[in-house]
Amino acid sequence: MLPILRLKITNVYAKGDYTVTVHVGSEAVPLQLLLDTGSSTLALHSNNYNPYHDSDLTTTSLVQEVIYGIGGWAGAVAKTSVQLHGNINLNLSHNYFAVADAGNMPFAKADGILGLAYKKLNQATDISLYLQQQHPQLTSSLPWPFKYSGCLELSKIQSLLADYPKKDLTPWFSNITQQGLTADLFSFYCRRSSVHCNENGVLATQSDPLNQGWFILGGGPEQDDLYQAPFFDVKVLHDVYYNVLLTAVQVDEQPLISCSLGKGNDESNGFFDTGAAGILLPIDVYQKITDDISTFNPALVSVLSKIPAFNGVEQGISNQWVDTTQWPDLHFYFLGVNGESIKLTCPPCDYWQCNAPVYGLSSFKIIPQLKHFSSQHIIGLPLLCNYYTVFDRQSHNTGLIRCALACR
């Protein structure tokens, strides 16, 4: 039987998103890396990890640039060793990663990002020709060879790289499974989608059990202390993101709100994203949800009017305005593995986060997408808080997402 690692995670470094401790390089530098099923790249802040002190490092002629819905970065690609220490230890001797020298990684105090999606999202650019044309010639992309490095210059970097050949790199988790170190699945357990801020200060917040969770590498159903059976299996349509089909949303027992299919021949219209601290919905779906909440309880209209417009930074309103017992459950209906409808529920205590982003405020975690976002339903932490979620990549060709009610 392949080993299963049970690793502690916390949301205090990445302002609500969850990080795991990963030891990188010959010096085994402990870094807090954001767990993200919405991307596939392993990338590190250059100010928290010094590649020039790493004797395990191998340079390449590759670079990567990633632009998220908010923020982005670019950097040289290299290879080094990675270690994980949980109930057992796991060592991976050679793994691609990027040193994020340019742009801005939007991950608060996290040291980088650990992408858990599929290979197609881990593309690099080979700049061998560019390096050869420099005077003197360069042999690798590290140190960063371009003059552009600022946050506002990512589009220039993107344009500069457009004409150079591309290469899909094996992501970190795929590399682990291909080497036979664990089975091709992992699981995620959390209690909050925002940091629960404690009135007694930073240390109390860091140790708060509500801000902790578990990342299970190579395992899932055997962790039966974390969930209540049965599992509900959501179909993964593509091995890119964890692409799913959200057919409808429902406020309490009101009529279903239909969700548009994807574009063209692609019926998937969303994905499960552990790196999203909210549930991001197309504006029309968001508006119908708030309308139905108002119908469910007209007294909530005044509270909805107080919610600040989303600007990429978490905001809140006074706790005294939010009594979650007066708010409805939200139900999300997904396409199941056998064509059936899978109903997952987000209770008010999960889409409202009390004592966030500071003590005394509450944050509303259902978010209308910004204009520059694609018209996707991004299923983030508020829904995952209610479930123990297994990302099973070894079943049904493209995988499935198994959800069982979390023990909380």
Image (cartoon, grey):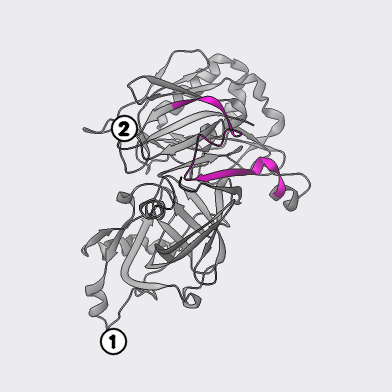
Q: Which of the two discs, 2 and 1, labels the residue nearer the N terminus?
A: 1
Q: Quadrant of the C terminus?
A: top right
Residue for badge 2: 268
Q: Nearer the viewer, residue 286 or 246?
A: 246
Residue 196, horizontal then vertical, whole percent:
67, 42
- Depth check, front residue: 140 or 194: 140
| Cα gap from disc 2 to disc 1, whole angstroms | 49 Å
Residue at mark 1: 136
In this picture, is 53 found above or below 392? below
Q: Is residue 226 magenta?
A: yes
Q: Is residue 67 above or below residue 375?
A: below
Residue 406, image quadrant: top right
Q: Farthest residue in the bottom direction?
A: 136
Q: Is residue 93 visible?
A: yes
Percent of width and height locating residue 325: 66, 21
Q: Position of residue 146 (x, y in %)?
A: 34, 73
